[in-house]
Amino acid sequence: MSDESKDLFYHYLFRDNQHLESGTGSRSYNEKPPYNNYSQGFDDPSYNYMSSFNDHQWSRPSSSQVFASVESNLKPREVGDLGHAAGSSDVLVTANSSMSSSSTEAGAEEDSDHHKSSKDRQPKELEDGGESSKKVPSKAKKKGEKKQRDPRFAFMTKSEVDHLEDGYRWRKYGQKAVKNSPYPRSYYRCTTQKCTVKKRVERSYQDPTIVITTYEGQHNHPIPATLRGTSNTAAAAIFSPYMFTQPTAAARPVPTFPQHYFAAHAQIMQPAQIMNSQQQNPVLPNSPHHDHQLPDCGLLQDMIIPSMFLEQYNYDP
DNA sequence: CGTTTTTGACCGGCGC
DNA sequence: GCGCCGGTCAAAAACG
């Protein structure tokens, strides 16, 4: 990557002249998401969640743009506060108030046991007894109770590197082919113990130069001091304000937008689309510009504004 | 040799 | 009930 291009990196997009249609929540889940009752913030096209960032410590390159898509499950109070904080809106965020997430297990996360229970899954089919061993989730997960996801946050980055450094340490735990795309999707988990944050990385099949990264959950620990030899200070500052459950002065370094951080590999960030299996059409800003370049494969799902977005402005212990 | 990646199997949800 | 699909597990391999 040339030096000159570094300036272009990270087009800090976030404008407010575009809005998502939002909220149709065409999702057909058995249970209606609890936040459906107070998602007006997302149904209001004039509402801009991300703008609050700009009003605070987020510094941004003047000429850059960054597009991010999120879906939120904010609570009324939170929405209100956020909205309040939002003064000037120069942030573009697509949102959707459907989703299968709730704050119930916010930090806990059932991820591990959920599968652990099934961990007894005999390696391959060794169980002579036969399929019966097909284990039944002993997990307390009651029927009808849907597994809940943590909030997700996604963005698109123009990059030659798939997995961009973000200051945290990740372990890849899976890779799957993406429907209608020649590029696979990789699944990563934060390596810190007890931390359940997950990350998904895939390359857009429509524009292979773009990488779509999706974060799910919030880190419950500080950014690793060292990241395999490399200084990750700058990187750490990028997501930390979003990823901490319990923000503290120490835990929340002054954020600086990805600019320097991704500078080495990334060029531009574009809007990440919001889709889910029920929606064949992306929920995105009604910008004709987007229409033609939106993939029709379920790339991003269940985008939600992470609660960490709120904690910055609405943190009560 | 501890950690991470690879990769096919497995799981649970969902549509038909 | 069956097949598809997104996501996860986990044994083995690769890596440092």
Image (tube, coloured by chain):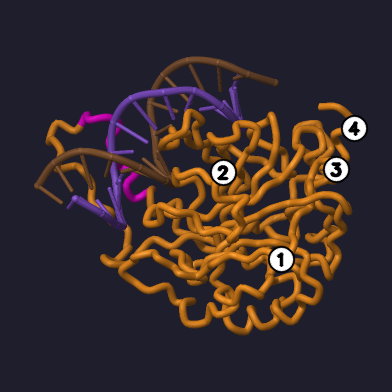
Chain colours: A orange, B purple, C brown
The CA distance from mark 2 to mark 4 is 27 Å
Residue type at numbered disc 1: Asn
Dots 3, 4 in contact, CB < 8 A: no
The quadrant the C terminus of chain A occupies is: bottom right
Q: Quadrant of residue A235?
A: top right
Residue type at numbered disc 3: His
Task: Classify mark 4: helix, strand or loop.
Answer: helix
State the residue lying farthest toward the front.
A288
Q: Report the residue marked by disc 3.
A: A260
In the rendered structure, the residue with mark 2 lies on which chain?
A
Q: Report the residue marked by disc 4.
A: A4
The CA distance from mark 4 to mark 1 is 29 Å
- Label drawn at residue A293: 2
Task: Classify mark 2: helix, strand or loop.
Answer: loop
* Above or below, comparing residue A141 to residue A315 in the picture: above
Range of the magenta residues?
A116-126
Q: Specify which label sits upstream in the sequence, 4 or 1.
A: 4
Residue type at numbered disc 4: Glu
